[in-house]
């Protein structure tokens, strides 16, 4: 196994040469029970560190049913919703569900959370504000530790819960990254895969931690993106297009000054975000969202910024450039993959997650 030693970043944010390579995780939609069980077993056997299931009720099975299946069919890998939100599920319900997964799995749960996207919009709801996460994360932590907390004018306690499961906050803008540095145990940095953007994001996390008197080096930093890996690099790139548009429609929405959008692309990006259909979110194959991005001339940029795609060698080179920043882990979505098991296998080879079967 590759990831037996916890990395400790130096004051400059770089990792020491003797420390191990970054951890690796994949997230996907729990489309069927068979998919969850097979993928979870495959990921564990190939040495992945973390498995995430999307919480998107209109597009996939219930996330906690899926996590229960994964927990009962694995023994080592970390498991969690990736990501849930505080809108479609009350924080107490989420805390109880994640604490339940932690119990079932023997202490292997984590909680991934953000303001919400497809899991909220497809229910006709609005995402939680970025600022609200400053309150939501500590609330969830206390609930999972079995503490009595004030919620909506009353007092709530999950009396049987005992462990504050690690909370990963997904963040993409300066404010969200700053808040993540203030309150989260770990951060899913969702700004893309360009090293300069990731380095800038880490700076926001560091400033948030320091503003709250925390040691930012104790916060795990995981870089998010979408991925597709095949011996045929062209095939992998074609297959990841829908996922690249999907993640971009979320990350690049809002104030363009906070999104590092290249000059001259602002209007095209805004049109893409306005026209994006969350009902087609991360669906395999060519869908209207892909057509829209291609018509707007954005696809090459979206692939460069958000996707790890191509042959194992191509993917390895892009990952190594990010690993040099001293990040703790990679989290790649393979939700739109038409061949999930191939991507799990090929990405393990690209990321060096463990010994590969012959």
Image (cartoon, helix red, strand yellow):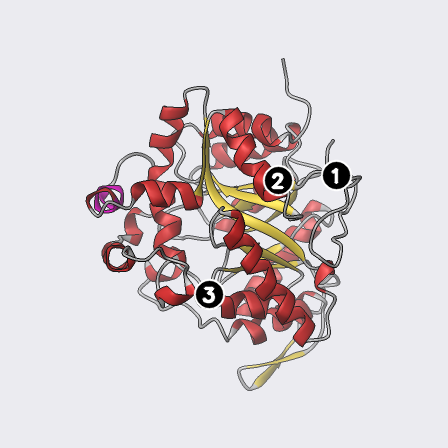
The answer to which image quadrant residue 37 occupies is top right
Residue 72: x %, y % from top left? 64, 39
Q: Are marks 2 and 1 in contact (CB under 8 Å)?
A: no
Left or right: 286 as drawn, with respect to 65:
left
Residue 326: x %, y % from top left? 67, 48
Q: Are marks 1 and 3 in contact (CB under 8 Å)?
A: no
| Residue of label 2 | 24
The answer to which image quadrant residue 210 occupies is bottom right
Q: CA distance from mark 1 to mark 3?
A: 32 Å
Q: Quadrant of the N terminus?
A: top right
Q: Is residue 221 above or below residue 126?
A: above
In the image, what residue occupies the spot 39% across and 38% down? 336
Question: Is residue 51 at least partly visible in the picture?
Answer: no
Residue 25: x %, y % from top left? 59, 41
Foreground disc of the pair 1, 3: 1
Q: Secondary structure at mark 3?
A: loop
| Main SS of residues in magenta | helix
Q: CA distance from mark 2 to mark 1?
A: 12 Å
Q: Is residue 168 above or below residue 345?
A: below
In the rendered image, residue 331 lying in the magenta stretch gets the answer no
Residue 20, disc: 1
**Which comes sooner in the sequence, label 3 or label 2?**
2
In the image, what residue occupies the spot 58% across and 35% down? 40
Left or right: 82 as drawn, with respect to 263:
right
Foreground disc of the pair 3, 2: 2
Q: CA distance from mark 3 to mark 2?
A: 24 Å
Q: Which residues are magenta?
A: 288-293
Q: Are marks 3 and 2 in contact (CB under 8 Å)?
A: no
Q: Quadrant of the C terminus?
A: top right
């Amino acid at each position: 196994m590759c990831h037996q030693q916890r990395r400790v970043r130096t004051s400059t944010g770089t990792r020491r040469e003797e420390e191990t390579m970054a951890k690796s995780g994949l997230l996907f939609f729990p489309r069927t029970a068979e998919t969850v069980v097979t993928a979870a077993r495959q990921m564990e056997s190939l040495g992945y560190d973390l498995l995430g299931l999307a919480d998107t009720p209109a597009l996939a099975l219930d996330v906690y049913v899926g996590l229960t299946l994964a927990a009962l069919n694995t023994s080592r890998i970390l498991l969690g919703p990736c990501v849930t939100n505080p809108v479609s599920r009350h924080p107490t319900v989420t805390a109880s569900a994640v604490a339940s997964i932690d119990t079932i799995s023997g202490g292997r749960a984590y909680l991934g959370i953000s303001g919400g996207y497809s899991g909220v919009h497809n229910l006709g709801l609005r995402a939680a504000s970025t600022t609200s996460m400053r309150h939501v994360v500590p609330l969830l932590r206390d609930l999972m530790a079995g503490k009595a907390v004030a919620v909506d004018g009353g007092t709530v306690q999950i009396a049987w819960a005992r462990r504050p499961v690690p909370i990963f906050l997904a963040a993409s803008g300066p404010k969200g990254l700053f808040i993540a540095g203030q309150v989260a145990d770990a951060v899913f940095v969702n700004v893309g895969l360009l090293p300069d953007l990731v380095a800038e994001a880490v700076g926001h996390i560091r400033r948030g931690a320091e503003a709250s008197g925390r040691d930012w080096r104790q916060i795990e930093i995981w870089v998010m993106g979408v991925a597709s890996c095949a011996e045929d690099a062209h095939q992998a790139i074609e297959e990841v297009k829908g996922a690249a548009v999907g993640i971009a429609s979320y990350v690049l929405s809002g104030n363009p000054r906070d999104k590092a959008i290249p000059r001259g692309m602002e209007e095209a990006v805004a049109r893409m975000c306005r026209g994006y259909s969350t009902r087609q979110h991360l669906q395999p194959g060519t869908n209207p969202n892909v057509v829209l991005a291609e018509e707007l001339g954005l696809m090459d940029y979206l692939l460069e910024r958000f996707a790890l795609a191509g042959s194992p060698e191509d993917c390895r080179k892009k990952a190594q450039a990010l690993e040099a920043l001293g990040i703790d882990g990679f989290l790649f979505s393979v939700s739109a993959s038409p061949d999930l098991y191939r991507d799990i296998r090929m990405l393990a080879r690209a990321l060096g997650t463990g010994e590969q079967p012959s």
